[in-house]
Amino acid sequence: MRWSLLGLVALLPALPGRAHSVSRQDETCLTQMATGRQRRGSPIRFVSLVGTEGSGHHLLTPVIRKIMAASLAPGQDDVDSDHEVHFGFTGAGADDLLWYAFKGSNLQAFREALHKQKHGALVQQEYSFPSGDMRSPGHRFYNLTDLYQMLEASGVRQKAVIKYVRPMPQRARSVFKRWPEHCAGQLIDCKAQQMAFDQLIEGHLAELDKMKVPVLRIGMHLFRIDCHQFGLEVLRFFAKAKLLPPGSPYEKEDSDETKHLTEEACALGNALAEQRDAVDASDANTTTLVDGR
């Protein structure tokens, strides 16, 4: 199915109070889109925050969201203070058509959903591998290679992956402590799941490396020993991946804006860590009372 230029023009954002006119450059861009040829630039920026269950999504994702909201999408103040399991793409709109197109392996619908995004929109994949009841490594939700091939085929050039890293025994114990039902009540099953999904992620990242997709591996260890350095590493990565807007003050490590942002992100992360520690302590006390020990 070919799109008409008129139909594509209708998808372009018009400035308030001005009629939308088509320049020669617009016509060239629209023709390339209509004929399926690659075009320079992209309608969105796409970032995946991936890692196995227990690798730190509930702490690190809100922190990185805070950094992204300031440095990649200035003016956004809808950063959640917690991370909930959500199968979909954050920032892609309430209808989540982009997600359903990926889920259904429908490239044409995927492209159409992309064209409906605001130019420069920041879209994120944030769920852990695995999440919820979707425990099979073969599930479509976890196919990073296909996702990034669809993004590439649709002209999305600004895309990157952040993988949360944490030692496997710590990840397995974290999952077993909070969701033992995910491991049939046995720690050894949690460890087996961790190994299977980490191998799955690394296999996909090897394919993404061939596609020249930037990947940052970072985790809770660095956050806990030097939160400021954690924030700087994330900002450096955004700059290297060409995700920062032109002239961004966050390109300079010694800028007041950068220091202020890393301080805010650290404050959020430390508050979340204290909340989680308090919940863990309460759970431990409850278990002691129940067991009578």
Image (spheres, rainbow, N blue to C red):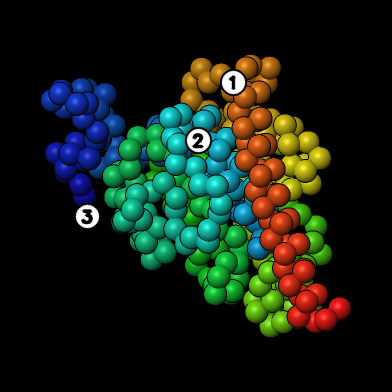
Circle 3: residue type? Met
Circle 1 sits in a helix, a strand or a loop, which is it? helix
Where is 217 relative to 40, above or below? below
Q: Quadrant of residue 115?
A: top left
User: Which quarter of the rendered picture does the N terminus lie within?
Assistant: bottom left
- Residue 66 visible (yes or no): yes
User: Which residue occupies the foreground of this view, 211 or 69?
Assistant: 69
Examine the image and state in which quarter residue 106 appears: bottom left
Q: Name the N-terminal-most of marks 1 and 2.
A: 2
The CA span between labels 1 and 3 is: 47 Å
Mark 3 or mark 2: which comes first in sequence? 3
Q: Residue at x 55, y 70 (%)?
A: 132
- Residue 187 appears in the picture as rendered: no
Q: Which amino acid does label 2 sit on?
A: Ala
User: Which residue is at a point 77% across and 69% down the rendered structure image?
Assistant: 285
Give residue 257's mark. 1
Q: How far across and down, in percent of the image, does residue 215 sit?
A: 64, 43
Point out the tag, 1 or 3, that comes first from the N-terminus.
Answer: 3
- Identified at 49% across, 21% down, the residue is 246
Q: Mark 3 points at which residue?
A: 1
Q: Residues within 10 Å of mark 2 (few under 14, many from 20)?
A: some
> What residue would you read off at disc 2?
69
CB-based contact (under 8 Å), mark 1 and mark 3: no
| Along the viewing direction, whichever of 23 and 184 lies nearer the viewer | 184
The kind of secondary structure element at disc 2 is helix
Q: Is 218 on the left-hand or right-hand side of 119?
A: right
The picture places residue 176, in percent across and down from the top left corner, at 73, 72
Q: Distance between the residues labelled 3 and 2?
A: 36 Å
